[in-house]
Amino acid sequence: MEAALQTNVQTCYHCGDSCEDEPIVAHDKSFCCDGCKTVYELLEENNLCNYYNLEENPGITGKKPVAEARFAYLDDAGVEAQLISFKSDNIAKITFYIPQMHCSSCIWLLENLFKINPGISESTVNFLRKEVSLTYFPQKTTLRDVVTLLARIGYEPEITLANTDGKKTSKPSRTIIYKLGIAGFAFGNVMLLAFPDYVDFTQGLQRTFGSFFGYLSILLSIPVFFYSARGFFTSAWEGIKQRMVNIDLPISTGLLALFFVSIFDILTGRGPGYLDSFTGLVFFMLIGKYFQQRTFDSLSFDRDYTSYFPVSITVLKEDGEESSTAVRNLKVGDRIRIRNQELIPADAMLMHGRALIDYSFVSGESEPVEKVVGEVIYAGGRQVGESIELEVVKEVSQGYLTQLWNDTVFNKNEEQYLHTYSNIAGKWFIIVTMMVAAGALIYWVPRDMDMAMRAFTSVLIIACPCALSLATPFVHGHTMRVFGRNKFYLKNTGVVERLAKIDTVVFDKTGTLTEPSEAELTYTGKELTSAQKQAVLSVLRHSTHPLSQRISLGLSGSALPVTDFQEFTGKGLVGEVNGMLVRVGSASYLGVPAEKQKDTLKTTVYVSIDGVVLGYYTFYNVYRDGLQQVLQGLGDKKIAVLSGDNDHEEARLRELLGKEAELNFNQSPVQKLEYIQQLKARENRQVLMVGDGLNDAGALKQSDAGIALSNSVTNFSPSCDAILDASAFDRLSNFLNFSKTTMTLILMTFAVSLVYNVIGLTMAVMGLFTPIVSAILMPISTLSVMTFATLSVKYAARKAGL
Amino acid sequence: MYIIFLMIAVSVTVAAAFLGAFLWAVRSGQYDDDYTPAVRMLFDNEVPAKDNKSPKEEIAT
């Protein structure tokens, strides 16, 4: 027993965190905090300890207590109606997004919720989408109880304003699977019927039953033509309407030629037709489309501000009573309470308390901004420190952030990226095909009318660039998967091609180049003795101000008792330790004259002991690991930085990024967006924007490719083309270079498929192209293209170390 | 030789039945999530077996 306890002491039985302070030992197990222990007890009480047998320490840390009063808004019938997907008198159904879900224990527990709350009849997890669909009895339990239960066991569902917008997330489309199924069915059966054609000894069979086989094949091919292949025809038609030639145009001509020549041949009894090739091609090309469609289900790339805002907020009534209200129902004049780390949902005036607002996500300023009573605080900031009271001055929909977002320039003009390799190839393809077909016609017409028609149609059939249309989806699809394995998630396969063309990289500073949670600290001035240091530390320990906490982290030693401690909002601290009067704070608080202040742009904290100013602390940004590596890897690409922060870091950035880089500071979200537009319009550059916050949202949308950097990919990130996990930031240049490599791979695959086309074309113009040749050539060419694309990406990825 | 008509009719019918089954499976949502069911099927059998000699008892003895 001794040993068992000993091994358990280091880590929490529930969440696996190390128990830094004294672990809480209960039920022969140790826990890092009360939260974890409570969850364990709740599970044990309900006989759900299997949770701990499936995986080691599966729990989610309970260190951050959940304020359950927060969920009171869920009792509101209006909110409930917006969230619930189905409700009758007896049952209600709802789907929650739970980003914390991470292992099979999670699945097991979430599917056994009914054991804890009998009011829940069923819960089903979709792990890839990180969703749980619940069915519950409204008579026995309420929505609020369900959510509270989830939050209590650590799986608080993410319910944001976007959920109440009525925009239901669309289910993945199943159409492509239906199409594939039907095409596959027809392909198999038509192939069976066509088989007597292929070999010599069954020729007799073909003579007797040929027409029966033919009619049956036509019957089987009709759904393929009208249903499975429809996407190719509509896409080609859309292209023609916009006077654009895309890859689907030559494909459609090929398919049309195949289908109608076959029907003509069968009906007139000339031959067995090419329906096996027709159905087979549609089947293979649909596989390519299916491959292209698969994306990362659990990630959301098109979020707007509504996914950032919470649904509810604490409102103070006139008698001082707290109640929870939906953010959407906030009215001008409402008094709201914002606690530590909560978001301010509407522009509001500070009424009470000390506001320290962290705007880093919204504006890019790296330090929290201090606000005094009476100032208006814009929505989107996060309060750090004590809880504050505010009075709403503008409704949520009228707020600064919301207005900014609804600005039309923030909406990407959805110009289709038509100039993709395959579309350009498609254009040339159709030109060459038409020329060859016309050539064959001109050559044969005077000699043999019948042969002329056959050569003409066979050219159209064989020139169908089906293998070509498979190359891009397969190469891009595999590339996307390789990136996903390396924590770089693309919205769709088209992004690979845009990444490959990038010649300019624009970075945001705060949170993107810098590590948001860290700051480097330097002390300038007269050296502090260890006794003085201890005194300063003791005073700082009494303050919850983030700057105080950062400095005290940098000082070592134990704290001494402090007498006469006082904190002045927006100024600094004072306290007496061992007879020393310690004052810490801003320059003006300590009476440092303006002309003596140094580094005014930087965040500084001055220290004085017994009335003598000794020196000051300066904060520097900490740049992400691997930044050097990324910058080197970018090579000769143009680099620029757009920062919402002031220019105190200019010298360091210059040193890091080199002379060529363009550095822009104090940029508003609109300025960032305009900068990108300018780069694109005037210098005709292909711009990659890397950002993390709401202030980059416009720039991310305007750029050719926008990457949102996130410390946790399931967290909110502004809408973008790709999400990059911060831990993979050092590989950013590898990703860009690899995208380039994949374009070469596509060209190589094109070359492979062209070989088959040239062989086929040669036979076609000579009038030698027969159903049997088609039946051999077609599967070989598609399969070899698919294999080549798959293997070459795998090989290249291994070589690139991805 | 005319048996071939019957054989082909049977083979196409069987294939069509499978196509129908496939379409039904897609429609009922079985292709929406291809990960969770694979994990879920392991729960009922393996876990209670493990539970019989749970670590709790080992510690208690």
Image (cartoon, grey):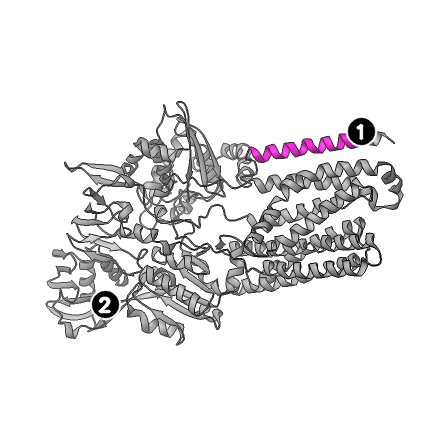
Q: Is residue B7 magenta?
A: yes
Residue A444 figure quarter: bottom right
**Residue nearer the viewer, A274 or A502:** A274
Which residue range is magenta in the image?
B5-29
* Circle 1: element type: helix
Count the marks: how many?
Answer: 2
Image quarter (top left, top right, bottom left or bottom right) of the C terminus of chain A: bottom right
- Judging from the image, mark 2 belongs to the subunit labelled A
Residue A260 figure quarter: top right
Q: CA distance from mark 2 to mark 1?
A: 92 Å
Q: Amino acid at mark 1?
A: Leu
Residue A111 location (% of width, % of height)? 46, 34
> Which mark, by number, is residue A617?
2
> Which mark, by number, is residue B6?
1
Q: Which mark's residue is nearer the viewer, 2 or 1? A: 1
Which residue occupies 62% across, 47% down?
A: A233
Residue A414 location (% of width, % of height)? 46, 54
